[in-house]
Image (cartoon, grey):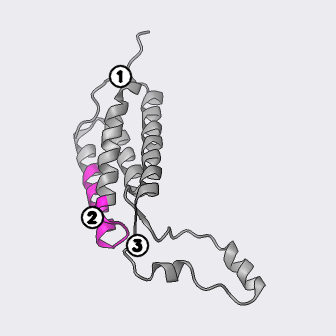
Amino acid sequence: LDLSLIKNRKMWNVTLRALYTLMSIRSVRVISYLLTVLPSQNPNCYREHFPLPPDDWMSWIQQGMLPAVHGGCNDLIVSGHATVLITFCCFVTSVANHKYISITLWSMLVMDFMIEIYEGFHYSIDMWMGALLGIIIWHLLAYLEDNDEQ
């Protein structure tokens, strides 16, 4: 899967392309969130993430200070996890321009997607939509890497 069609590229242009890809995907993700939110695959998600508040105010404040790092309970139709990984894979494959690195990286990506889906962290549609959207936007932003004649 050779994504590097332009040789002798500037690293700044490739990085800019990756950042614009992420920015574009995040914008589409916000729009998709406003239009569609899938329910959680875990039926106990709300109970685990949002327990009943404690009775006394000091315990309430202490519980509020704990970091909420377990994600939300609704799943977006475009997975943020998938979009970041796809952008990373496109970037590395594009820069490395090596057959075995590309095969290994994309195989690990597919394996990660399957594990995320199997363990119930994501629906299959939000992972594959994130991947498809990421690859399409990566290719659409190829013009950012046009070589300037010096």
- Asked whether 74 falls inside the magenta stretch, the response is no
Q: CA distance from mark 2 to mark 1?
A: 35 Å
Q: Which image quadrant: the C terminus?
A: top left
Q: Main secondary structure of the magenta part?
A: helix
The label shown at residue 40 is: 3
The label shown at residue 21 is: none
Determine the image quadrant of residue 51.
bottom right
Please name the amino acid that badge 3 sits on.
Ser
Q: What secondary structure is found at the residue carrying circle 1?
A: loop
Please name the amino acid that badge 2 sits on.
Met
Q: Which image quadrant: the N terminus?
A: top left
**Residue at far bottom of view:** 55
Q: Which residue matches tag 2? A: 114
Camera-side residue of 116 and 51: 51
Bounds of the magenta span? 106-125
Q: Which residue matches tag 1? A: 8
Residue 105 % position (x, y): 29, 50
Residue 42 % position (x, y): 39, 78
Left or right of 114? Residue 74 is right
- Asked whether 114 falls inside the magenta stretch, the response is yes
> Badge 3: how crowded within 10 Å, few (<14), some, or many (20+)?
some
Quick one: label 1 or label 3, which is nearer the N terminus?
1
Left or right of 3? Residue 88 is right
Quick one: label 3 or label 2, which is nearer the N terminus?
3
> Badge 2: how crowded within 10 Å, few (<14), some, or many (20+)?
some
CB under 8 Å between discs 3 and 2: no
Residue located 42% across and 56% down the image:
35
Residue 24 % position (x, y): 44, 41
Q: CA distance from mark 1 to mark 3?
A: 46 Å
Camera-side residue of 112 and 40: 40
